[in-house]
Image: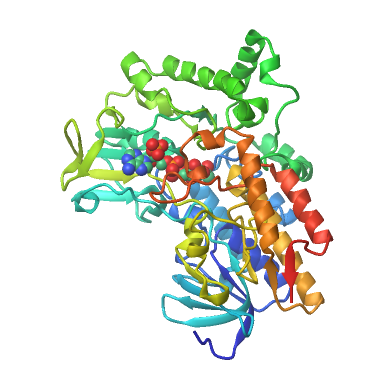
Amino acid sequence: MNAGEDTLDAIVIGAGFAGLYTAFKLREMGLRFCAFEQGDDVGGTWYWNRYPGAGSDSESWVYSFSFSDELEQDWKWSSRFPRQPEILSYLQHVAERFDLRSCFQFNTRVQKAEYDETENFWIVETDSGKLSRARYLITAVGCLSAAQLPQITGRDTFEGNAYHTGQWPHEKVKFKGQKVGVIGTGSSGIQAIPVIAKEAAHLTVFQRTANYSVPARNYDLSDDQARSIKKDIKEIREFCRWSTIGQNYDFREGEALELPKEQLERQFEIDWEKGGFQWMFGSYSDLVFNKKANELASSFVKKKIRETVKNPFLSEKLVPQDHAIGTKRLPLDIGYFETFNRDNVSLVDLKDTPIESITPAGVRTSDKLYELDSLVFATGFDALTGPLTRIGIRGKSGLLLKDKWKTGPRTYLGVGVPGFPNMFMITGPGSPSVLGNMPTSIEQHVDWICDCIGYMRANRLISIEAETQAEAHWSDHIKELSEKTLFPSTNSWYMGSNIPGKPKVFLPYAGGFGTYRKLCNDIAEREYEGFRFT
Ligand code: N01
């Protein structure tokens, strides 16, 4: 590819939290850059995931940027867990407030990015055929942005309306008076099902794996609550930065297995009333690391499901049977299990009667045809690697990133890849990313990457590339850490198991946000140990 003479300092892909903050930083640094976004506006995840009930499972006051005190003080969140329209408004506000829209070319999909080894530049081609050339390529493509439709026979023959939660239409979708089907009971399905059930004439939930869920216990923020959070926000943010999952809480001292059963049960109850991820990740760490302790937590939630769902036959179907709690991403819900007490909701257990095909009229299982007006695929994403491998990224010697990662992603710090110089991934595979609060993770990565670029410019360095040995150590480290947890025991998108043919490798870094931050800081201090400069 030949991109002509005009060479930029950087090209950024994506206009979600990561792309917006990167644009803000690069402009502050005085770099010449161009940013591309597939959608027609900013928002990333919150631009695409507009399904009913969509919202953040992190508390609003931490699910936001911390880089501007004024922004933090001025913006008013309405509730504990903000819903999609409010988060999208927030990101639009950020774009306006810092004049970031002007940095982006919207409606522009990056098709290819190729590294020119002789000149040490990235050449990027967009869907309009336009080529751009830059020293650095910064991917802000998100971790859960490559929507995955299931490979079901006849999938595209359905004659009703079909939607994927991650590619939801912008116009209002109406379910009133309709027979609606939802396939999938991950976080998206669990958020959408209670809301769709209230509108549809009938909702059929097609469940392959019964899932755990913890109540969100969302609430509106009073003026007093908002004021008090704002007063303490600096301490709150600092706590998040060094915590295990980037949130304003961490594991308690001690172990669940050390406690008398009644005392643990009481604690579970108290935490259940508070709601949120804290129920598990603000509790005892052995719930995550020890199978026996995890069984206590799993049993508690199973009991809650049985208490909530009135029909005992149905409640047994909804009780997870085959995985430890937390080994699939733990959903938070607003009335999910209660929804199955409604007369207009039915559950199809695909373990008993698998889907055989999708027909023009609906979903056919081994038992019968479910006729539907609308079908919602809440079937997830090609997580972490998909957003990157779906772009034709070629490094040195024309190697495709997709081919390099054929047996699973290997990175250094989740930021760099040997053979792909001057490419920086924000929250890439091998970083903590999806194991906690994304904005905390994103800000850390963007700051680190921009500092690194600043260092290179100050030292007149042309290229940076992760060393193969560093990549090998890091990949071994990711594996070792994951083996200390219960994650590998379950088929989940964390393990790549939701994508046919995807290697079964644990994708994120499980050593905790704070530990990772310190590691990254130390590596930077040691002049980017593990990276080679020219
Ligand atoms: O996707 P998932 P998601 N036939 O992969 C089922 C984030 N998120 O969109 O478990 C039948 O978790 C599949 O079944 P099984 C969050 O990180 C964040 O819900 O594979 N069923 C599963 O039930 C989350 O984890 C927020 O057996 C099929 C479901 O589809 C991530 O996004 C809110 C099937 C997919 O669940 C992804 O969640 C919402 C088939 N062929 C989501 N294929 C926030 O808080 C798949 N399934 C910000």
Is any atom of residue 237 visible in this view? no
Instruction: Give left or right: position of 321 versus 451.
Output: left
- Colouring used for the render: rainbow
Residue 402 pos. (x, y %): 48, 63
Residue at image point 41% right, 75% down: 127
Residue 37 pos. (x, y %): 50, 67
Q: Is residue 341 above or below residue 21?
A: above
Figure quarter occupied by ligand 1: top left
Using the image as rendered, state which of residue 77 and residue 525 is in the foreground: 525
Using the image as rendered, state which of residue 438 and residue 344 is in the foreground: 438
Q: Is residue 123 above or below residue 428?
A: below
Q: The C terminus appears in which quarter of the rendering?
A: bottom right
Q: Is residue 329 above or below residue 522?
A: above
Q: Quadrant of residue 231?
A: top right
Is any atom of residue 107 visible in this view? yes
Residue at image point 69% right, 64% down: 467
Q: Is residue 491 above or below residue 85?
A: above
Residue 453 pos. (x, y %): 73, 70
Instruction: Give left or right: position of 298 versus 337.
Output: right
Using the image as rendered, state which of residue 134 and residue 528 is in the foreground: 528
In this view, the residue farthest toward the bottom is 5
Q: Quadrant of residue 26?
A: bottom right
Using the image as rendered, state which of residue 196 and residue 282 is in the foreground: 282
Residue 14 pos. (x, y %): 53, 64
Instruction: Give left or right: position of 135 versus 165.
Output: right
Residue at image point 67% right, 52% down: 474
